[in-house]
């Protein structure tokens, strides 16, 4: 039979990839990534959008030139209006090459009089209609309120998740799942800080969205772990870590398929919508979803399950079970206790040896002598054979008196030649 490929063995859950056995490697990798993310938080910080930092947003048509030319024009307008503030083109929303493409130029907070003076200078410099240049003043208080509500929602979500997982599984599984969720959030935020994308309300919505996806994948893996480890201490063939690793292998292809199905539309939103079509407002949501969902699949496999085994190995019952399994394997390797397959072979060998003993052969010879062979050319008495052969459908006659006391017709036929039915 042809050798099965990796994909086929993954679908059957027979790949036997040692994921849980390398848990120290995954823990070290996660710790390094978390340190990098925290370092980025401290030294680089976040590029906060206007909703969080506040300021004035000036919108102009994209046909004035490139973003650099638009930024230079805004700087000249600010200088002409006498406003001592520095403007910077932070985002450009451009949908194709149509007439609705615009540039969004953000400055620090301007008063109404300063904003009107900057718009007038900009219209005169660029030669565009006054109705095509607009301004929008955003207060940082709105972004702070959104952040506060998001943190409250995150806290409530984590409490409910902990309660559900404790009731559905146990507290160790709940702790491992929540740790995996926090790892997803920290690493996704670290990517945002390193890349320098703006943090907008869409980003906050994306962060809350990836929590549900990550939790779903973790629950699928833990459900299979619970199935494989139910009553595991009653046997001595597999440790808790090995049963968990088997569960991860059995759900690995399901996790990969779920992640790919979720990442394909999000990747289209990020790379096609924001990259090719120039929809700048889509990149904030697309990046957080793409990074968060990808990390959610990886963390549920390489972090949540290994962390669960690390917590369970500290339980006295699991610790003694693991020691018993390892001791039994050590005894089997040293020859003190034969494996089960060898014990079955030895039993069959003893039975075969008993049948080949001298006493058994003597009895076999005696039985052969009791029945003399019949020559092939011996005459056959056909009438005797016909008389001794039972009639089809007749009852057995051995050990019974078929005459039934000599009554007529007792041999099976009634008087008058009628057969008994």
Image (tube, grey):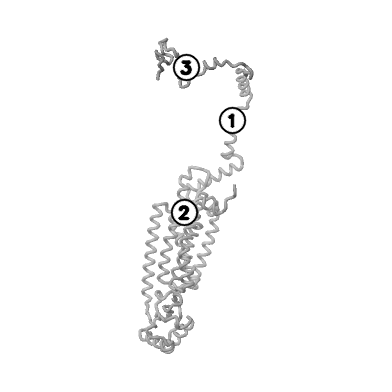
Q: Is residue 145 in sight in this rendering?
A: yes
Q: Please name the residue shown 57% across and 51% down the image.
A: 4
The residue where tag 1 is placed is 351
| Whole-percent x, y for residue 90 in the image | 45, 78
Against 201, residue 88 (above or below) is below
Please name the residue that numbered disc 2 is placed on.
221
What residue do we see at 38% from left, 73% from top? 143
Q: Quadrant of the C terminus?
A: top left
**Residue at which label 3 appears:** 397
Residue located 60% across and 34% down the image: 346
Task: Indicate the position of residue 102 as horizontal and vertical percent values.
Answer: 43, 79
- Say what secondary structure mark 1 lies in: helix
Q: CA distance from mark 3 to mark 2?
A: 69 Å
**Viewer-side label of 3, 2:** 3
The vertical placement of 1 against 370, above or below, is below
Within 10 Å of disc 3 (Cα), the crowding (few <14, some 14-19, many 20+) is few
- Which element carries disc 2, helix, strand or loop? helix
Q: Which SS class for mark 3?
A: loop
Whether the residues at callouts 1 and 3 have beta carbons within 8 Å, the answer is no
């Amino acid at each position: 039979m042809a050798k099965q490929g990796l994909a086929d063995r993954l679908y059957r859950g027979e790949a036997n990839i040692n994921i849980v056995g390398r848990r120290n490697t995954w823990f070290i990798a996660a710790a390094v990534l978390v340190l990098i993310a925290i370092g980025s938080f401290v030294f680089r910080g976040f590029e906060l959008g206007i909703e969080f930092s506040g300021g004035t947003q000036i919108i102009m048509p994209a046909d004035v030139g490139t973003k650099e030319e638009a930024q230079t024009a805004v700087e000249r307008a600010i200088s002409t209006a006498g406003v001592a503030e520095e403007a910077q083109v932070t985002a450009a929303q451009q949908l194709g090459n149509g007439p609705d493409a615009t540039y969004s130029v953000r400055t620090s907070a301007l008063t109404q009089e300063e904003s009107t003076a900057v718009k007038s200078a900009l219209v005169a410099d660029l030669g565009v209609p006054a109705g095509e240049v607009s301004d929008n003043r955003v207060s940082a208080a709105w972004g702070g309120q959104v952040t506060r509500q998001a943190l409250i929602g995150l806290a409530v979500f984590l409490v409910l998740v902990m309660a559900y997982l404790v009731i559905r599984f146990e507290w160790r599984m709940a702790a491992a799942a929540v740790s995996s969720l926090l790892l997803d959030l920290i690493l996704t935020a670290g990517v945002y800080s390193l890349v320098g994308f703006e943090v907008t309300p869409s980003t906050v919505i994306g962060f809350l969205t990836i929590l549900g996806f990550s939790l779903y994948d973790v629950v699928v893996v833990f459900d299979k772990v619970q199935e494989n480890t139910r009553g595991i201490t009653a046997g001595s063939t597999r440790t808790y870590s090995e049963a968990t690793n088997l569960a991860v292998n059995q759900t690995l292809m399901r996790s990969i398929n779920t992640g790919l199905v979720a990442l394909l539309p999000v990747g289209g939103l990020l790379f096609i919508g924001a990259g090719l079509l120039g929809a700048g407002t889509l990149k904030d949501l697309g990046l957080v979803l793409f990074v968060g969902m990808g990390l959610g699949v990886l963390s549920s496999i390489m972090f949540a399950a290994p962390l669960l085994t690390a917590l369970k190995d500290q339980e006295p019952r699991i610790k003694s079970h693991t020691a018993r399994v390892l001791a039994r394997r050590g005894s089997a390797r040293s020859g003190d206790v034969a494996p089960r397959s060898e014990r079955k072979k030895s039993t069959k060998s003893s039975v075969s040896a008993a049948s080949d003993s001298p006493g058994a052969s003597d009895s076999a010879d005696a039985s052969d002598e009791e029945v003399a062979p019949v020559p092939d050319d011996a005459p056959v008495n056909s009438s005797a054979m016909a008389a001794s052969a039972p009639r089809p459908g007749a009852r057995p006659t051995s050990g019974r008196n078929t005459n039934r006391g000599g009554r007529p017709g007792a041999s099976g036929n009634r008087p008058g030649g009628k057969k008994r039915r």
